[in-house]
Amino acid sequence: MITLVRTDSSHPDFVALVRHLDKELAAIYGESQAFYDQFNKINMIRHVVLAYDDDKPVACGAIKEYSNGVMEVKRMYTLPEYRSKGIAAQVLAKLENWAASLGYDKCILETGDSQPYALRLYEKCGYKVIPNYGQYAGMGSSICFEKSLNPDLGR
């Protein structure tokens, strides 16, 4: 049974999962990953969700304020053997609900073009591709997404 837990970036299970994520990203993107590493520091992130299969940490994600009314989804990761089981979607939904409860209207995120699991997840969860924002503008391997947390606002 999967259990979701709210915490912050100091949690040792989050730190361990992020190490797995960083290792996987380095294997996929090689030296170019160094550019992105500067935007993925995990110190001082107050909103982290961990997923556990019994007592084993298997997935994580975080949100942090990007701008007024906008949270940025960061450090989403699921252990490879737990992918395609809906766990990441549960983590993402928990993060979105948390952002909405804090008064945020939208979530944005960046992922890489060589991460098919991530791309499918975000599309399945209702995220729409947007022009690359902020530090990702002009980065060919970046794909940025957004999702309104209050669909009625867009009408």
Image: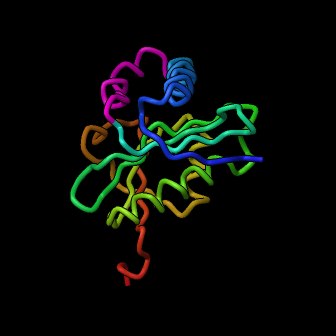
For the point 38% across and 53% down, the residue is 108
- Residue 144 placement (x, y as % from top left): 40, 49
Q: Which residues are magenta?
A: 29-44
Q: Nearer the viewer, residue 3 or 133?
A: 3
Q: Is residue 18 above or below residue 120?
A: above
Q: Is residue 44 visible?
A: yes
For the point 41% across and 45% down, the residue is 47
Q: Nearer the viewer, residue 102 or 68?
A: 102
- Residue 19 placement (x, y as % from top left): 52, 21
For the point 42% across and 47% down, the residue is 73
Q: Nearer the viewer, residue 52 or 61?
A: 52
Quarter location, residue 81: top right
Tell me how the rendering is colored: rainbow
Q: Which quarter of the image is occupied by the C terminus?
A: bottom left
- Residue 142 placement (x, y as % from top left): 41, 39
Q: Nearer the viewer, residue 2 or 122?
A: 2
Q: Is residue 28 visible?
A: no
For the point 56% across and 57% down, the residue is 123
Judge left or right: residue 29 versus residue 54.
left
Within the magenta stretch, is there residue 66?
A: no
- Residue 95 placement (x, y as % from top left): 48, 53
